[in-house]
Image: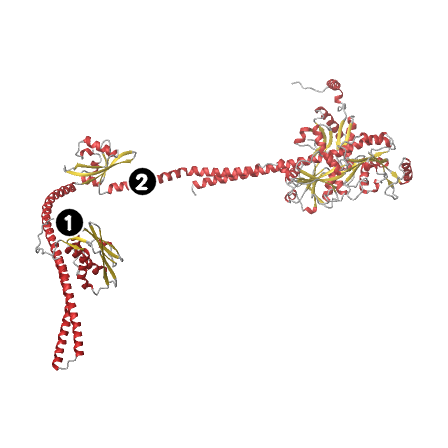
Amino acid sequence: MKKYTLTTTNRRFLGGIFFVLACLGGSAQAGPDCSRPLTLALHDHGLLYSAATDSGIDKDFADELIRRSGCKVAVSFMPRARIWQLIESGALDFSLSGITNAERDRFAAFAWYFSNKYYLLVRKDAGVRGLPDFERNRDLQLGVIRSFRYSETANRFVDTLHDANRLSQAGGLTPLYQALILNRIQGMIIEPFDYPALEEKQIRDLTAIIEFNDPPVPHGVIMSRKALSMTEQKKWRELVEGMRADGTVRRIFEKYFKPELAAAMVDFQAP
Amino acid sequence: MSLVRLLPALILVAALGITGLAWNHERQVTQKALQSQFDFLLRETIGRVEQRMATYEQMLRGVQGLLAITEPTDRDAFSNYVGALQFDPNFASIQAVGIIKRVPAALAPSHVASMRRLGFNDYVIQPAGVREVYAPVIQREPYVGRNRMRPGFDAWSDPVRRSAMERARDSGMAAISGKVQLVVDSGADAPAGFVMYMPIYTRGQAQDNLAGRRAHLAGWIFASFRMSDVIASLYGEKPPGLAFSLFDGVEPTEAALLYRAAETRSRPAAFAANEYLVVGGNTWTLSVRSQDDFETRFGRNSALIIAATGVSLGLLLALLTWLILTARTRALQLAANMTQEIRESEARFRDFFEKNSSVMLLIDPTSGEIKEANETAATYYGYPRTQLAGMLIDEINTLPPERVAEERQKALHEERNYFLFQHRLASGELRDVEVHSSPVVSGGRTLLFSIAHDVTARKQAEQRVVETLRSSEKDLEGRVNERTAELSSTIERLKQTQVDLAQADKLASLGALVAGVAHELNTPIGNALTMASALEEAAIELDAMVAAGGLRRSVLAAHAQKSKGMAAIVTRSCLRAASLIASFKRVAVDQTSEQRRKFDLHALVDDNVAAIKPSFKKAPWIIEVDIRADIGCDSYPGPLGQVITNLIQNAAAHAFDGRTSGTLRVYATCDAEMVEMIVEDDGKGMEPAVLAHIFEPFYTTKLGQGGSGLGLSVSLNIVTGVLGGTLQASSDPGYGSRFTLRFPRIAPSQVAQPRKDRRRREQPSEG
């Protein structure tokens, strides 16, 4: 068979075709569809976003993403549980820093931009050195945020405790910290962006951290399948990829984390 | 352990096990379902609360929007806006919407002044005091009711409110305070309330970062709430089966209580959960508990039903298995029991049949075949058993076969069961047999069960007896005749003896009479003799005295007197003797003669009584005679007197025997033809047994004591015979006896009777 070599002529020819195609593709190729106002919701979660200061990683990311898209996106604030409900129903277009699972995958599409592991924050005086200890001791309550899911082991752990009626749910992190300090709960699951709060609220001294032996879980932009078509999703994903590629994401993370930690979170293999 | 016991037990265990598993599973499923339902209701409740708060926030955003375009001092605009919001019941929970102005200390006086100019004449910032910043409420809408309270309350002075206000300022979003008592609610029992603050920034200034927000804060708008009103407007009805409470903060303490629903629980809640809500930057704890009707509403009783059904079915199944397994055994047992009786009965019969000493056969009624024969039969007939059972009875019975068949039918139909046949033995000998035959059911067919008794000997014996009887009969006849002849002659002799005895009796009584007479005569004659002797002696004495010559007149007179007396006695005595003799003579004549004459009954009786009186002189009883003097009779006085005498003698001997007193009455009545004379006593009387026999010859109760037993018999004969009358006796034991004579005054004429007695010739009587 005759080998096909990329001669200059060929290159030009190909380039021309591509150009035509690109034009034919029209503005669809250029960016997401902005013909309607879009909605994006943030939830209060440590460094990701603080309602009190209206600032955080996700806030910065949202601003940048919106700017790049050129669309009008209304940013609102609501509890995480409600975010998932509205993503599912299609009333909400976007949210941020979500992880996927089988159920969520049915109604949400994702564009990953960071990953992290999950940790069990447990009171020292609970006498827990490993997950089995926590499971065994029926007096120990775990605090979780309503609608949150975690890594595999952590999910199993949480589900076991749920069946045993040992979960205390909350709408956000703040009450969980308060409850932990007051010993109303003895453990809660945290991620790296929860650390500063630990320092701030003097939780660090009371507690120990136990790792869930799972690989880091990718977090990403949540896109409602009902609200956004596959092509739109792709476009938005590309924007995110772009932000990752040009280091914007890293920069945002480095604002809040030490460079190594930021790197660990931002550099991941997208599944 | 046998299968029979093991298998049902296994099945029961298995059934129970399965039931247990099913029940447990069902229980768990039910529990899970309830848990899910509870979780769902909890989630729903949380959602409602969060949404309502979001709605309030939206409302405040609207106000914020208003203030973005109007002057903060345009009170009317604000008032109109709030009015336009039309607080329907959905928003009825909002107590007030208001404006707070941020007033730095320096601007405080001018603020107060401008407020006063607006019409609030006594406007002051409360609480009083100097602070860096004031945040007084300058307007409350709708301006009704409690909201008409004077403005000026410095919310910044309350730490709880201040915290929320700061959060609102910094975030640019609505913030909710902790639990507060609303300013418009005064008093100790103020309901729990909270305030939502929305920041207002100076128009046109930068608000997109924290610093900017803090720097350009103009004030706040707020909405104040009573929690109870909020909850009331939140639910049309309570969440089914649940009750919740709201607390401010993370801890469910009384102090932090914002709202508590009335609970209808009688036992600890099956499901309970505490959840932390974050609303407007503030944490609330929602505490939910299931109520009694939660389980009834959402639960199922299927676990119990499964358990009950499973257990009962398991038991039934085990029982069924056991029944099936043992069915065969039980059936066999039952059959064995039933046949046991039959077999025993069969055995008994067989024994009875085999070992019986009587000849027994089982014969087919139709064919006459001998189905079975016992040992005795074999021996008797002289055939071996095996041969005998199989022969026809016709071969044995000497009657023609048709007759035998007939008889068999009779036996079969129980018309007869006793037969007399002649059977032929194997030896050819003919024997007479008595056969008892009756039908028996054996093995489904009817056979004749026959017992035969050899009666040959008996028959012969019977024959002999008959012959003997016949000859005996003849003998007997002859002897009877002989005897009869003997008896007749004996009777004749006895009759003669009776007559002789009567005669003897008569003679005896006569003898007694003579003895009596003699005895009676003895006395007068004795007296006469004595007196005569005395007279003789007196005469001798007188003679002596005369001879002696000293006889005095007195002595002589005395003597004469004495002699007179003595002579009188002699005379009397002799007269007495003569009369006795005369009367005895009459009696004797009468007694010994059966001559008929006319006589007076009274005289006769008297005579007879007199004659026998002497013999009873010493008796303690008396005789009374009461007879009219004019009863004349023409009859036989002798026999009659004999009868009377006899009766009196009887009375004396029997009636008054052993008595110390008594009366014998003889009285008579008469009419023209008949005389009735009664001799009655009040003596011992006679028992009826005695009375029945007294007239029988030789019947006496005093045998050996002089009673011959003939007296009354003879009397009866005399009365009925010669006198032609009747003699009856009656007695009352212990009270007396009565003899009643009835005879015709004129005796019937005598018919000559053949006599073989030696009679003296009748002497003519004198009377």
Q: Residues within 10 Å of mark 1 (few under 14, many from 20)?
A: some
Question: Distance between the Cα atoms at labels 1 and 2?
Answer: 96 Å
On the image, the x and y values in percent for residue B699 come to 18, 56
On the image, the x and y values in percent for residue B624 come to 23, 59
Residue B756 or B12: which is nearer the viewer? B756
Residue B514 left/right relative to B689: left
Location of the C terminus of chain B by quadrant is bottom left
Which residue bears the numbered disc 1? Answer: B748
Query: Dot 1 lies on which element?
Result: loop
Is residue A247 something that shows in the picture? no
Residue drawn at x 8%, y 52% as measured from the top left: B756
Chain letter for mark 2: B
On the image, the x and y values in percent for residue B450 come to 23, 37
Are callouts 1 and 2 both on one chain?
Answer: yes
Hey, what amino acid is under mark 2? Arg
Which residue bears the numbered disc 2? Answer: B343
Q: Residues within 10 Å of mark 2 (few under 14, many from 20)?
A: few
